């Protein structure tokens, strides 16, 4: 799922239906970044803010790991992780963290499915243009006053966003800034760390990328060394694959097969 989204989209319904028709289970789940704003209840009973407005995307590691463990508990031994938009960033981060930990969970992951991976820090700079540095300074000042949960001014993002979350995307982003499509010398280390089959898709209509989808696909196919990769775009699809859900679902199932 992407920013402020959930796992009940038409896209996910189409993929789950196609999966069941072909003998695969489909377990959709939300992480703490789902929806715009919500409460997160801790083990102590204490509530804290969640949702895309307040989330730290690094925390999704715990949610994705938990979902993997639940799938294993259900008896599944071959797991494909799928995410969309910001969800792809979270999956790549989680996979790399599990790999760095030499986690035994990696043996259960048989493939990675990334739908519309975007360069969030770069897109944010493009969106804000000349206001980027001014808003970054504003956020740093708020953080220094321990006001990180305050909201950024209107227009700082595509939806309301807290100071802490803005800074995660804009500055303190080393751990999630791995889709540097505009940097010809970038080696995409985190993506190349993925040793299982890799499926990546974008749309070519209102997609959140700088270059054309064709140029991006050519770049990624050139840069990614995975021998079992399926990297392409769907003609006419937008960022959410609206109206192209069936095409996407068929391509994903063929990849798994």
Image (cartoon, grey):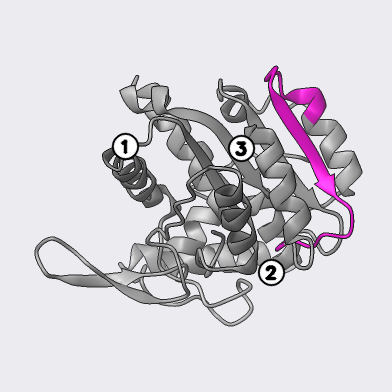
Q: Is residue 38 magenta?
A: no
**Is residue 198 visible in this depiction of the protein?**
yes
From the image, which quarter does the N terminus lie in?
Answer: bottom right
The local secondary structure at tag 1 comes to: loop
Of the two numbered discs 3 and 1 on the same chain, state the one appearing first in sequence: 1
Counting other residues with Cα less than 10 Å from the Cα at mark 3, is it few (<14), some (14-19), or many (20 or more)?
Answer: many
Instruction: Return the mark for residue 131.
Output: 2
Instruction: Return the mark for residue 75.
Output: 1
Judging by the rendered image, the residue that carries numbered circle 3 is 178
Residue at 50%, 67% in the rendered image: 6
Q: How many marks?
A: 3
> CA–CA distance between discs 2 and 3?
24 Å
**Is residue 85 visible in this depiction of the protein?**
no
Residue 90, horizontal then vertical, whole percent: 49, 46
The local secondary structure at tag 2 comes to: helix
- Magenta-drawn segment: 221-240
> CA–CA distance between discs 3 and 1?
33 Å
Which is closer to the viewer, label 3 or label 1? 1
Counting other residues with Cα less than 10 Å from the Cα at mark 2, is it few (<14), some (14-19), or many (20 or more)?
Answer: few
Counting other residues with Cα less than 10 Å from the Cα at mark 1, is it few (<14), some (14-19), or many (20 or more)?
Answer: few
Residue at 14%, 70% in the rendered image: 46
3 and 1 marks in contact (CB < 8 Å): no
* 113 horizontally vs 35: left or right: right
Residue at 64%, 60% in the rendered image: 14
In which quadrant of the rendered view does residue 214 lie?
Answer: top right
Front one among 31 and 256: 256
In which quadrant of the rendered view does residue 203 lie?
Answer: bottom right
Residue 103, horizontal then vertical, whole percent: 33, 24
């Amino acid at each position: 799922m992407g920013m402020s989204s959930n796992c009940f989209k038409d896209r996910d319904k189409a993929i789950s239906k196609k999966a069941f028709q072909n003998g695969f289970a489909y377990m959709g789940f939300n992480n703490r970044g789902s929806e715009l704003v919500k409460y997160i209840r801790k083990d102590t009973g204490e509530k804290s803010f969640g949702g895309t407005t307040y989330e730290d995307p690094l925390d999704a590691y715990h949610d994705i790991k938990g979902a993997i463990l639940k799938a294993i508990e259900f008896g599944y031994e071959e797991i494909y992780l799928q995410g969309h938009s910001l969800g792809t960033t979270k999956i790549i981060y989680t996979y790399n963290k599990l790999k760095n930990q030499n986690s035994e969970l990696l043996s259960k992951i048989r493939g990675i499915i990334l739908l519309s991976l975007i360069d969030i820090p770069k897109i944010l700079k493009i969106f804000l243009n000349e206001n980027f540095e001014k808003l970054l300074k504003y956020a740093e000042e708020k953080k220094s006053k321990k006001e990180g949960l305050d909201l950024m001014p209107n227009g700082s993002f595509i939806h309301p966003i807290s100071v802490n979350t803005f800074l995660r995307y804009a500055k303190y982003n080393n751990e999630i800034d791995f889709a540097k499509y505009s940097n010809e010398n970038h080696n995409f280390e985190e993506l190349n760390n993925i040793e299982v089959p890799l499926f990546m898709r974008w749309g070519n209509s209102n997609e959140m990328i700088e270059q054309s989808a064709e140029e991006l696909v050519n770049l990624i196919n050139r840069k990614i060394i995975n021998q079992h990769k399926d990297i392409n775009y769907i003609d006419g699809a937008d960022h959410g694959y609206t109206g192209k859900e069936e095409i996407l679902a068929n391509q994903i199932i063929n990849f798994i097969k």
